[in-house]
Image (spheres, rainbow, N blue to C red):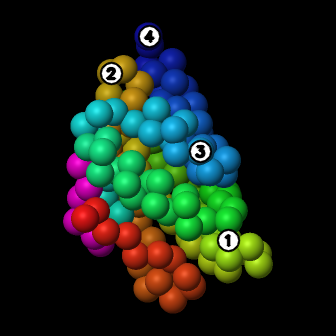
Amino acid sequence: MNEQEIVDRNVAKVRLFIDAWGAIDPDVAMACLSDDIVYINQPLAPVVGQKDVRKIVEGIMKLSHKVHWELRNVFGRGNTVVTERLDCWDFNGQGWGLKLPCIGMFDLNAAGKICGWRDYFDNRMWFENGGPTLHLD
């Protein structure tokens, strides 16, 4: 694959991952991630590996009535994809209680799987608007 084909493949994978959130489908979301995925939800500690990242993804999805990650900008260079998003969350079935501006950075491996996922957002805004606290234990 040439450079543009790699970027196109990687952007498509990230879009598939984002669409899985809208569908509240943890299986599709997790299929986009490598076995050794490292997820960093700034400023929290990294979560490493499919098992623990699945706990986070499934946990948030189970607590969500609806999810929509509105892509404002998405672009890639090499094996990195950057997303500027407005993440909209309905935790109680009463509408978008949280609209969270977010920058997401995704690193993809040679197989086209997301191996690094970093989200940057206002953590206080998340918790003050109903965002759940999840634990791995």
Real-space CA distance between mark 3 and mark 4, rounded to the nearest whole angstrom: 30 Å
Tell me the residue that label 4 is attached to. 1
Real-space CA distance between mark 2 and mark 4, rounded to the nearest whole angstrom: 11 Å
Q: Which residues are magenta?
A: 42-48
Tell me the residue that label 3 is attached to. 25
Residue 16 visible in rendering: yes
Tell me the residue that label 2 is attached to. 110
Label 2 secondary element: loop
Amino acid type assigned to the residue bearing label 4 in the image: Met
* Quarter of the view holding residue 104: bottom left
Q: Nearer the viewer, mark 3 or mark 4?
A: 3
The answer to whether 99 is drawn above or below residue 14 in the figure is below
Looking at the picture, tell me which residue is in the foreground, 104 or 2: 104
Residue 90: mark: 1
Asked if disc 1 and disc 3 are in contact, CB closer than 8 Å, the reply is no
Label 3 secondary element: loop
Asked if disc 3 and disc 4 are in contact, CB closer than 8 Å, the reply is no
Label 1 secondary element: strand
- Residue 2 in picture, x, y percent from top left: 44, 13
- Residue 122 in picture, x, y percent from top left: 45, 78
Q: Mark 3 or mark 2, which is nearer the start of the sequence?
A: 3
